[in-house]
Image: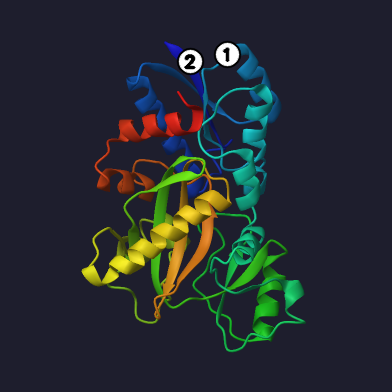
Amino acid sequence: MEKLIIYHTDIDPKTATPDDLDVLEEAKFVSEILSKMSYEPILRSFNIERAREEIKRISPVFVFNLVEAINGKESLSYLAPEVFEQEGVPYTGCTKSAFVKTANKISAKNILNENGITTPYFLTLGDLSKEELQGRKFLLKSATDHASRGLEATLYQDKDSVERALKSRGIDFFAEEYIEGREFNISIIGLISKGIVLPIAEMQFKDWKEGKLKIVDYDAKWNPNAHEYSATVRNFDFLEEDQNLIKNLESICKSCWNLFDLRGYARVDFRVSEQGIPYVLEINSNPCISPDAGFIAAVEKAGMTREQIIRKIIKYSCNI
């Protein structure tokens, strides 16, 4: 059997958070599928120098890249594809270029703005002295962390409160305008410049607590004991009146796919305002593909098996 290496984030199970542990579940899930495909998968946590030695020694036919952070920093995740490229081994998922472009949400939002793709208005601490809030309401977000880390259902509406909040959270945070409306998570697969949009998922807020802000925060994603977890429901079925919106979302996803050099698989998250305007929240160049993730739900809605999507990811990424 041909050997391959599945690299995942180096995680200490003793101190891991629920989203960290999900990476280990994801690696196990992918390994089981690859074993059924007659490969010999070798699971390894990612360390730069160790990876170089392992790739030389094992000589894998390809690497399945599930590295979401290095040294605890998601902003360094681009170093994994950089190593794979330097070692000349094919690898799944997005290229180093895509990781670099999407690693910082502020930089990504600037790219979106420069290319005419609507994203919510945002402010850094340094912007507050020269920008007006103009009645906007803001959420605080991490510029580098995904999985809703640091996202709280609290709105800030004046300069003083935004400034205090940003100072308390640190330089990696920014304030993003809250868009009242609907939320969509959209998975995409394909070759570079040839993205295929999977069935579009809307995150609906069912039996939501009165007065609770309708966002997918950390509890909604990762805390099964929280009300928000069970009250956040993924929906793939839309009315005829939504079809123009669906086509618009698909078109924007394809534009993002090309603009950010995406490959293999990725996800684009949206809010759609009450006026029907889509806003790109962020581009995830390495979305979770664990068995209960939204990506796999979209795959199954598209009529594909889990083995079929892993085969497609390998083909689109590695040409194998």
The image shows residue 48 at horizontal and vertical percentages of: 68, 30
CA distance for labels 2 and 1: 7 Å
First along the sequence among labels 2 and 1: 2
Asked whether 279 or 230 is in front, the reply is: 279
Task: Please say if 260 is above or below 31.
Answer: below
Asked whether 143 or 9 is in front, the reply is: 143
The secondary element bearing badge 2 is classed as strand
Q: Are marks 2 and 1 in contact (CB under 8 Å)?
A: yes
Task: Indicate the colouring scheme.
Answer: rainbow
Q: Amino acid at mark 1?
A: Ile
Asked whether 207 or 234 is in front, the reply is: 234
- Judging by the rendered image, the residue that carries numbered circle 1 is 58
The image shows residue 128 at horizontal and vertical percentages of: 73, 79
- Return the mark for residue 3: 2
Q: In this rendering, does residue 230 appear at all?
A: yes
Residue, x 65% and y 79% (percent of image)? 162
Residue, x 63% and y 87% (percent of image)? 158
Q: In the shown orientation, is residue 88 left or right of residue 130?
A: left
